[in-house]
């Protein structure tokens, strides 16, 4: 991976393995999409995204508002509209750490280092952790049934790493908690954390039924 990567900061935390729809209308991000589409090999149409803590993405306020751990994505689909905007799809590939953001070009670029994913051994302890995470998420989905749409469709993955990313992406948690899941060292830590966070949400929903925890935990894909 090159140490420079086109960057698309968002008011959302993304995760590896998850497909992301994005609406692109700002000039700098249109330029980014045009740049990616000029790359002949679709597998190399890569860009990065980090979450925005607050305020502005780039410019005179710099990168101080950005989280440092983000996701490298691959552009998979792009539809250009008559007004020049794009609707795109991208899939999360892996994580990186942002060392520096440069906003001086036609689009932002980041100097990054890939962050390797450690695979924990699949033993009885990890299987038990996976079972508890699935059970907690199932209870959470049931609690949400009368409040909002089901946050996940289909069968949950059997692979511990993919399961951890799926639960992290599906749980409508506040942005700092989603960032903590993204930064977790491995699948075991991530499963343990998402289980604890969802249990906290369930307790809050039971204590204050008139104000579900999800009301303050809603997240949405930011345009730009």
Image: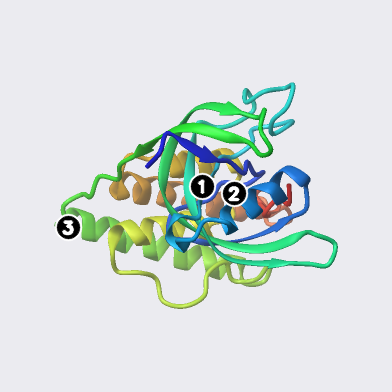
User: Is residue 33 shown left or right of residue 194?
Assistant: right
In terms of depth relative to the viewer, which is nearer, 210 or 11? Answer: 11
At a point 78% along the width and 53% down the height, the residue shown is 25
What whole-number distance in Å separates the C-alpha atoms at marks 1 and 2?
A: 6 Å
Q: Nearer the viewer, mark 2 or mark 3?
A: 3
- Determine which quarter of the picture holds residue 156: bottom left
- Mark 2 vs 3: CB contact within 8 A: no
In terms of depth relative to the viewer, which is nearer, 78 or 93? Answer: 78
Label 1's element? helix
Q: x, y percentage for residue 206?
A: 60, 55
Q: x, y percentage for residue 119?
A: 23, 50
Q: x, y percentage for residue 71?
A: 48, 46
Q: Which residue is mark 1?
A: 200
Q: x, y percentage for residue 132?
A: 33, 59
- Mark 1 vs 3: CB contact within 8 A: no
Q: Which residue is mark 3?
A: 122
What whole-number distance in Å separates the C-alpha atoms at marks 1 and 3?
A: 27 Å
Mark before the other along the chain sequence, 2 or 3: 3
**Residue found at the far bottom of this picture:** 154
Q: Which residue is mark 2?
A: 204
What whole-number distance in Å separates the C-alpha atoms at marks 2 and 3?
A: 32 Å
- Mark 1 vs 2: CB contact within 8 A: yes
Mark before the other along the chain sequence, 1 or 3: 3
In terms of depth relative to the viewer, which is nearer, 119 or 22? Answer: 22
The reply to whether residue 216 is visible in this rendering is no
At a point 69% along the width and 30% down the height, the residue shown is 58
Label 2's element? helix
Q: From the image, which quarter does the N terminus lie in?
A: top left
At a point 40% along the width and 38% down the height, the residue shown is 2
């Amino acid at each position: 991976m090159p140490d420079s990567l086109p960057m698309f900061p968002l008011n959302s935390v993304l995760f590896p393995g998850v497909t992301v729809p994005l609406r692109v209308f700002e000039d700098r991000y249109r330029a980014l999409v045009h740049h990616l589409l000029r790359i002949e090999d679709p597998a190399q149409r890569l860009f990065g995204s980090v979450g925005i803590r607050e305020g502005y993405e780039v410019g005179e306020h710099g990168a101080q508002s950005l989280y440092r751990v983000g996701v490298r994505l691959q552009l998979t689909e792009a539809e250009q509209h008559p007004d020049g905007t794009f609707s795109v799809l991208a899939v999360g590939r892996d994580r990186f750490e942002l060392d520096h953001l440069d906003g001086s070009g036609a689009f932002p670029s980041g100097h990054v280092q890939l962050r390797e994913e450690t695979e924990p051994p699949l033993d009885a302890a990890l299987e038990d952790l996976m079972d508890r995470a699935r059970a907690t998420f199932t209870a959470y989905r049931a609690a949400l049934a009368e409040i909002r749409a089901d946050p996940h469709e289909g069968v949950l993955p059997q692979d511990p790493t993919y399961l951890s990313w799926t639960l992290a992406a599906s749980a409508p948690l506040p942005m700092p908690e989603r960032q903590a899941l993204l930064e977790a060292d491995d699948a075991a830590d991530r499963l343990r954390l998402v289980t604890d966070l969802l249990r906290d949400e369930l307790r809050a929903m039971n204590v204050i039924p008139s104000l579900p925890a999800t009301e303050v935990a809603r997240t949405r894909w930011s345009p730009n």
